[in-house]
Amino acid sequence: MDRRGAQTQPLRTRSARDDRGFTIIESLTAATILLIISVVIVSVLITTGGWYAKATVRTQAATVANQVMSIILSRNYGDLHYATTEELNANKKWPAIIPQEMVWPTTIGDFSVETSLTPTTDPATGLEMKRITVMVNPVRNALDTPVSIIRYASGWQGMASDTGVFKVPVHVQCSVAKQGIRVELLDAGTMTEARYAITDPTGLAVFTDVVERPEGYFLTSDPRTGLTGAAGIDVRPVHFPTRIFPTHGGSANNPILSINTYTLEVVNSSTPAILRVGAYRRAGWRFLNEANGTMNWVSTDIPYRPVYGLTVYAKPTLNTTTDNGIYGLGDLSRYPDNTNMVYKGTVNAYGVATIEIPWTTDPSEGQYWTIWTTTQEADGSLSRHVKIDQATGGWNADVKIPDLPSTGAYTEAPQWEHLGDAVTPYDDPTPQTP
């Protein structure tokens, strides 16, 4: 009996202990393991986030460096020099002059650009050349190694600018891999087609002999004509045309016809993009709350007495800085002149003006739309209504409601509310300022 009791007592003790759960030591051990795992995960996330941020900055720096180098190489050889005292006194700015240092603004921050012009000699021909170095670094949080591009220039720049005899290959890769897209190089002065090429099945358009021009070209595509030359295909350019500067390097006696490669964002669509604007005598479109990323609208029928028949006008602002140059308003602005780019639409029974636009604006470049309309009050006076809209417009748009919002109690697309029961639509295309 005593032996049996001695054997059974420890078993009862362990059973009772197991019923009580983990011991303090076991709990501390599990917590320590979880803490170590959490620290490792957080460290990986921080490291990955930092790497991604650096990669984004370096990619943007490389884009800036290539743009600066393209503009420099588009000059006559005799113009490749730093600003003289006379040029500085004449208040000339980039790109009319080449500064040793300048700040280049982008959507992710400012970058410092340093340019070096060093005289040298072509060892093959003995001709005088210039070694051009463009080095780009963020103004804040400098990269471990700045992005640097080196090219050589000789007298071919003057010959190409004066006679246009130099021709370079250009490759344009469309974002949609489809055959038959008509890719266009537009004349920078007239915005008419200077050259076109048709894409292969991978979406690549090849130009073998594009004439160098100091003013460059505007790059876009034409959905009206494609592989057949008549019917075309339903592929349209996403954004307004952007200026490119196809160039080549080497010496006058030994030019290097390096391939100029660009990308073109396109979209499959049988119709132009739509910019939607609302106009209502009372309140506009609202929603109750968001569920699974979808807005629950108060009403899906005709809302709050729309101002039916009201004409709404829209005009894009493309070059969004005041500096002269590729991002500014000078002769080498990155985007076309918007003087005659005015589009309009009429408010329908749902209170939405659907304005057809050939391209959408690019929010990454800070572009926006100025939208205006005019109503006549009961006493005969005119009221001007103006809004600034950052929305880009889009394809396959619902013409019954403005764009869905992501935050707040109203749509992000512009809408005028509480215009009054006595207002009458008045068509006035005169551009307005907000």
Image (cartoon, rainbow, N blue to C red):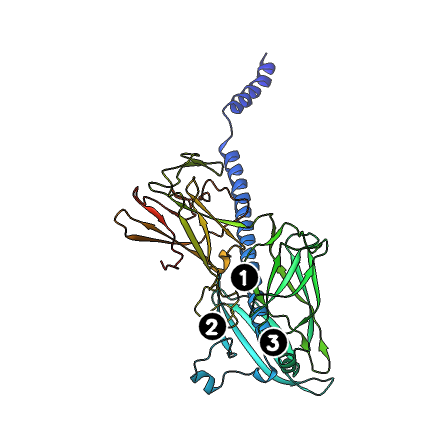
Q: Position of residue 341 (x, y in %)?
A: 48, 60
Of the residues tagged 1 and 2, which is closer to the observer? Answer: 2
Q: Position of residue 116 (x, y in %)?
A: 56, 79
Instruction: Say which residue label 1 marks.
Output: 57
SS label for mark 1: helix
Instruction: Say which residue label 2 marks.
Output: 324
Tell me the distance, in whole angstroms, between the alpha carbons under discs 1 and 2: 24 Å
Instruction: Say which residue label 3 marks.
Output: 73
Q: Nearer the viewer, residue 374 or 295?
A: 374
Could one spot residue 193 in this view of the protein?
yes
Q: Position of residue 266 (x, y in %)?
A: 61, 54
Of the residues tagged 3 and 2, which is closer to the observer? Answer: 2
SS label for mark 3: helix
Query: The N terminus appears in which quarter of the rendering?
Result: top right
Q: Quadrant of residue 323?
A: bottom left
Q: Nearer the viewer, residue 149 or 266?
A: 266
Mark earlier in primary sequence (3, 2)? 3
Could one spot residue 146 in this view of the protein?
no
Q: Nearer the viewer, residue 137 or 81?
A: 81
Q: Amino acid at mark 2?
A: Asn
Q: Residue furthest front?
A: 380
- What residue do we see at 38% from left, 55% from top? 428
Q: Amino acid at mark 3?
A: Leu
Residue 409 sits above or below residue 122 on the image:
above
Q: Position of residue 377 (x, y in %)?
A: 29, 48
- What residue do we see at 50% from left, 58% from top? 364
